[in-house]
Image (cartoon, rainbow, N blue to C red):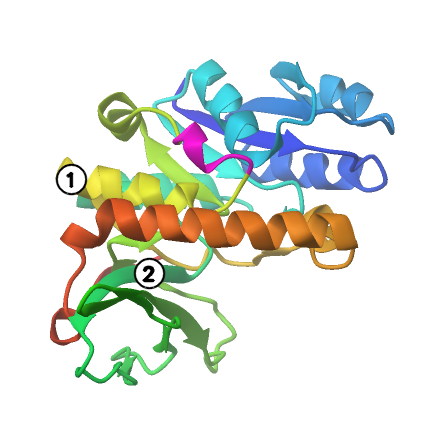
Amino acid sequence: MKYSIVLSVHNKAHYLDVFLDQLRRSAREAELVAVDDGSTDGTQTILGYYADRLIVANDIWEVRANNAGIAAATGDWVAIVQDDDFILAADWLDVCVDFMESNGIDILSGRGVGQIGVRCVGSENLPQKSWQIPNKIEALDNIPDPPVIDGDHYVYLHTIAKRFRLPSDNRFESMVTLCPMVIRSPLILSRRALDMVGLLDKGFAPLLYDDLDYCMRANAHGLKVAFTSIPHFSRFGGGSKDLYTDPNKQRLFQEVERRNRHKLLARHKHRFVNPQEIFVRNVGVI
C-alpha cells in the first residue's frame, strides 16, 4: 500500500457522508484509517461504510487519536487529515507524494503555513519583512509571535504564511517551501520519517504544537520539511470551532496552548536561529 490517510473524527455525522465521499474520490487508491473519537451521533456507522480500518476510541482528542491511526496505517506515505477539512483537488495526494519523492522531502504540510524558531538577545529587533516569489503569484508574509523571555534572550516562533494572487489563466499553483516547522492539516509523512522519528509526542496531548515538535525532531535526523498550499484544500466548517465559542473548551484550549507552546520552546530553543538567519527556500511548484 503506497498511501494511507489518517482521519480522526468526533460527532460529524451531519456532513460526514459528503466529506468522506469527496476524500475517497480525491485519493482513490489510499487506505483510509479512521478513528472515531467518542462520537454519539452516528458518526461511527458512517465511518464504517467508508473506512478500510476503523478504530473506536473514547474522546482521546487529536494527538492520541492521530497516533492510533498512524500506528494502524500500512502505507509508505501517511497523510493526516482533519475532520473539518474539505478537499476539492482530485489528485492532491499523488501530486504531493510524487514531488516529495523526487525532492527528498519527508514531511509536507498543505496548509500554507510554516514556522521558524528564533532565539535572540533582548536588544535585537524582531524582523518584519516579506519575500516575494519570482512568479509574482505568491508571497510569503512574515508574522513574528510575541516573544518569551528566556534569561538574557527572547525566544519566539516566526510564522511564514503564503499569500496568493490569482493568475490570469485562473490556474492555481503553489511553491513548495522548505522550512524547519510546519502545521497540519493535511500533513504528509514518509514511512522513513515515521521509522526514524516515531509517533507524535503524547506529552502534547490533547492537542496543539505536537506537529511543530515532530518537525523539530525530524530536523535533528536530517530530514527535509516543507509546506505548500494544496489546491482547493480549505476548511469545511465544524470541528474545532467550538473551542473558541464554548466557555469550558475555550479555557481548556487556552491552558493547553500556553503549556504546549512553553514545552516546545523549552525543548527546542537550543536549535533555534537568530533573526538574521531566518531563511526559507522554494524548491519547486505543484
| Residue name at image x 59 percent, y 55 percent | 254
Could you tell me the amino acid type at mark 1? Ala
Q: Quadrant of residue 279?
A: bottom left
User: In this view of the protein, which residue sits in the foreground, 280 or 136?
Assistant: 280
Q: Quadrant of residue 25?
A: top right
Could you tell me the amino acid type at mark 2? Gln
Q: Is residue 89 visible?
A: no
Relative placement, left or right, of 275 versus 139 is: left
| Residue name at image x 47 percent, y 67 percent | 172
In this picture, which residue range is highlighted in magenta?
201-206
Provide the secondary structure element on which disc 2 rests: strand
The numbered mark at residue 220 is 1
Instruction: Identify the residue under disc 2.
Output: 115
User: In this view of the protein, which residue sits in the foreground, 116 or 101?
Assistant: 116
Relative placement, left or right, of 269 versus 264 is: left
User: In this view of the protein, which residue sits in the foreground, 129 or 156?
Assistant: 156
Residue 112 within the magenta-colored segment of the rendering: no
Query: Is 195 situated above or below 107?
Result: above
Query: Is 59 situated above or below 55?
Result: below
